[in-house]
Image: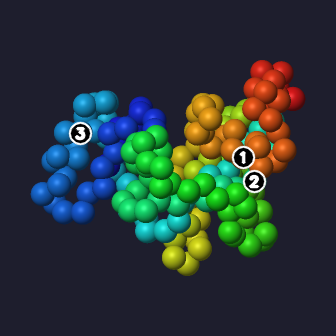
Amino acid sequence: MKPILEGSSVGISKVETTEALNKALELAWQYDEIALVEQWIEGSEYTVAILNGKPLPVIQIKINQGFYDYESKYLSNDTQYLCPCGLSNTDEKELQKIAMQAFTAMGAKTWGRVDFILDRDNTPYLLEINTVPGMTSHSLMPMAAQAQGISFDALVLAILNNE
């Protein structure tokens, strides 16, 4: 359960019982009057950053417990970001291909990030297309760019100059 207009996993709840449903709705509604209900997909989380029409290296996100929530993103020192991501070359290229197709289909341009869960059978589920991903020292876009050999300054200039 999540509000539709928030980022950074603010207002998200994993609902495991019917009793938890109302509490999750109340939390989501604190941030927006519309809440999105999605099926929970057990698996590993990956992200594909896109810069000027090209996918950057895939990053796997590993957390110790729960899901990749606000605390895991910004407060925990235990969250791991793996690049190389641990997928086979074929699976990584397939994820990048799907990310590019989704990004393009949405009319997104220049830069962004596409997030996935791969279930236990390695089937990819697209979670979201982030058209304004974070650009802090802990953000995934700069991490992917760095893995591609693109410095933070060069990344910012590439975005601004659309090149």
Badge 1 element: helix
- Per the model, the C-alpha gap separating discs 3 and 1 is 32 Å
- Per the model, the C-alpha gap separating discs 2 and 1 is 6 Å
Classify 10 Å Cα crowding around label 3: few (below 14), some (14-19), many (20 and above): some
Residue at position x 30%, y 50% from top? 13
Residue 34 x/y as whole percent? 31, 35
Q: Is residue 95 visible?
A: no
Residue at position x 82%, y 30% from top? 154
Residue 135 x/y as whole percent? 63, 31
The tag earlier along the polypeptide, 3 or 1, is 3
Residue at position x 47%, y 45% from top? 73
Q: Amino acid at mark 2?
A: Pro
Q: Amino acid at mark 1?
A: Ala
Contact check, label 2 and label 1, Cβ < 8 Å: yes
Q: Amino acid at mark 3?
A: Leu
| Residue topped by disc 1 | 144
Please state if 142 lies on the left or on the right of 153 as rendered.
left
